[in-house]
Structures are given as C-alpha cells and as structure tokens.
Image (cartoon, rainbow, N blue to C red):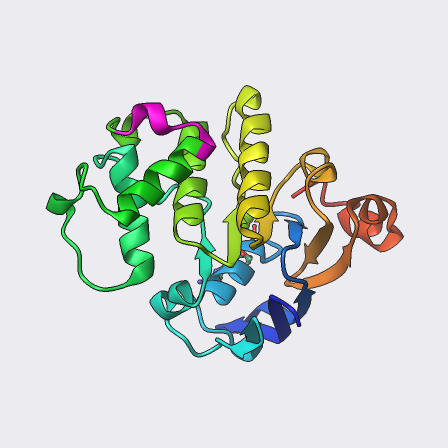
Amino acid sequence: GAALRVEGLGLQIGGATILKDVDLDIAPGSLVGVIGPNGAGKTTLFNAISGVIRPTAGRILLDGDDITGLSVPKRARAGLGRTFQTSSLFPRLSILENVRVAVQAAHGGSYSLLKFPRREDAATAQAIEVLEQVGLAHRLDTPAGDISHGDKRKLEIASLMATDSRLVLLDEPMAGVASGDVAGLVENIREMQRASGCTVLMVEHHIDVLMGLVDLVAVMYFGTIIALDTPQNIMENPTVQSAYLGTGATA
Ligand code: ADP
Ligand code: MG
Ligand code: MG
C-alpha cells in the first residue's frame, strides 16, 4: 500500500479555495519533489498533511491509517516529521540538545532540558550517531543559533533522522542555503532516505536539484496537483509547461 495517500483534499478559508481535489498516492520509500508557483498551495498541503490545519474536504492516510482527524503530536508519533520554510530550531540550545529535544518530543512524555547535556543514554547515543552522519558531530556543544543556514538545515535533517520519521515533509530545505552547501544537503537528504527507507516529499524551486535526487515530481497549480511523474517527463509535460507560462515562476 501507499505510504501517503491523499484523497480529494480540499480547503476553503473564508470564500477562498486554497486546496481543491488534491489526490496523491506515494509509494513507501519514494523521494518526491513538489514544485509549483508561489501561492499554489504547497505549504498549505504540508500543513494539512501534518495537521497544522484541518482540511474542509477529503482524507489523509499514513501507511493505510486515516490520520485526517489526528492532532499534530499524534501524527508525529505515528511517524510523520516535517521542516518549515523558516527554521524551527532552538537557537540557544546546542546542536546536540536540539536533536535530543526532537527525539524526546517525538517519543512523547515529559522531559527536562536540564537533563540533556551529555547524559549517557540511548537517545543521546542516537543523536550523536545522526549528527555524525550529517557531519555536525565535531560541534555538539555549539549553539544552533551560531551555525550557518546550511548547517541549520542539516541539523533539522539530523533531528528527523533521530526521530525515525517514516514520512518526512521538507518545505524548501534549500532556500537561503549557500550554493556551496547545496550538494552536501542533497547528500544528507539522500542518506536520510537510504538509511531509514522513509518516504520524503520536498518542496524545491530548482528542477535541476530534483533531477538527480527524486523519483517523482508533483506539480501544484492553483491549489491542486496537476501532474505527478518522473522529473524528465515533468520537464516535457505540455500541461506543466503551459501552467508555468505567464507566471514566470519556477516554484
Ligand atoms: P506556496 O507554499 O505554494 O507558496 P501557500 O500554501 O503558502 O503557497 O499559500 C497558498 C495560498 O493560500 C496563498 O494564496 C495564500 O495566500 C493562501 N493562504 C494560506 N494560508 C492561508 C490562511 N490561513 N488564510 C488565508 N489564506 C491563506
Ligand atoms: Mg510561498
Ligand atoms: Mg510555501
């Protein structure tokens, strides 16, 4: 079955239609790019899938289970992880503490930040392991607020890896990242997917970044998905080409 299934998803706010008849069927372990002009509804779709907003129509299924009515924390515990267009790290906590917080939050229950530093437990070991994988383990005690934008994104990827998310939604992970850091971040995303077999949806402006990385590209346009195909076929799709004509936008 599908890792993620979206059926007839709709969202009306006031009189406005933000999402309309969104259907998606994503196989487990796929890496899927999401493109579309600014305002097409990409972030809103991620908000609906992750439970930040409630759709006014349709259903969302995670590994076959209907999660449409679940709260954000319950979805996270069911294996859904995401990043936001704006970084959601704790700038005053260290690199290690940020991953520990993510692990604690995903597993639920109460926790104390005071207990974090260097506590020798399984979650700390796991946090250090994922930080090694993204290349941040040499700076465990550096405050997250002091690191580069690209490294913040790596830290977010590490947090998702540490929480064993089965479905990961990345909203413009490359935005604002220095061009020299893009290749490393792409490799981190690939490694996250390979190591855990998780399913990844990522909003990304540049089709050339998606080309060597993703299995499929979903195109959003005016609140709905107008195409889901290989990157190559998407580039050659006349519907996609005409949808982009006149907007001048690539994402
Ligand atoms: P994208 O991520 O593709 O750029 P968004 O999902 O951010 O697009 O926005 C899609 C559309 O929905 C935009 O026109 C935006 O103004 C509108 N929108 C998003 N959230 C709300 C909201 N809470 N209330 C009203 N309009 C919204
Ligand atoms: Mg936008
Ligand atoms: Mg957006």
Which residue sits furthest top? 180
Report the span colored magenta: 133-140
Is 28 located above or below residue 202 in the figure?
below
Q: Is residue 186 left or right of residue 81?
A: right
Quadrant of the rendering where the N terminus is positioned: bottom right
Residue 248, position as x, y percentages in the image: 72, 40
Confirm whether the magenta stretch covers residue 136: yes
Query: Residue 23, image x and y in percent?
Result: 68, 70
Give how far across and how far down residue 59 sits, in percent. Answer: 57, 78
Residue 16 appears in view: yes
For the point 34% across and 66% down, which residue is it? 73
Q: Residue at x 39, y 41 (%)?
A: 87
On the picture, is 246 further left or further right than 30? right
> As displayed, is residue 108 above or below residue 129?
below
Q: Quadrant of residue 29?
A: bottom right
Residue 187 pos. (x, y %): 58, 33
- Tell me which residue sits at (28%, 29%) in the image: 140
Q: Nearer the viewer, residue 176 or 107?
A: 107
**Frontmost residue, 229 versus 205:** 229
Viewer can see residue 90:
no
Q: Quadrant of the C terminus?
A: top right
Instruction: Name the one closer to the observer, 48 or 214.
Output: 214
Q: How many marks?
A: 0
Q: Quadrant of residue 236?
A: top right
* Principal secondary structure, stretch drawn in magenta: helix
Q: Is residue 250 above or below residue 18?
A: above
Task: Let me know if residue 73 is in the magenta part.
Answer: no
Q: Is residue 53 left or right of residue 19?
A: left
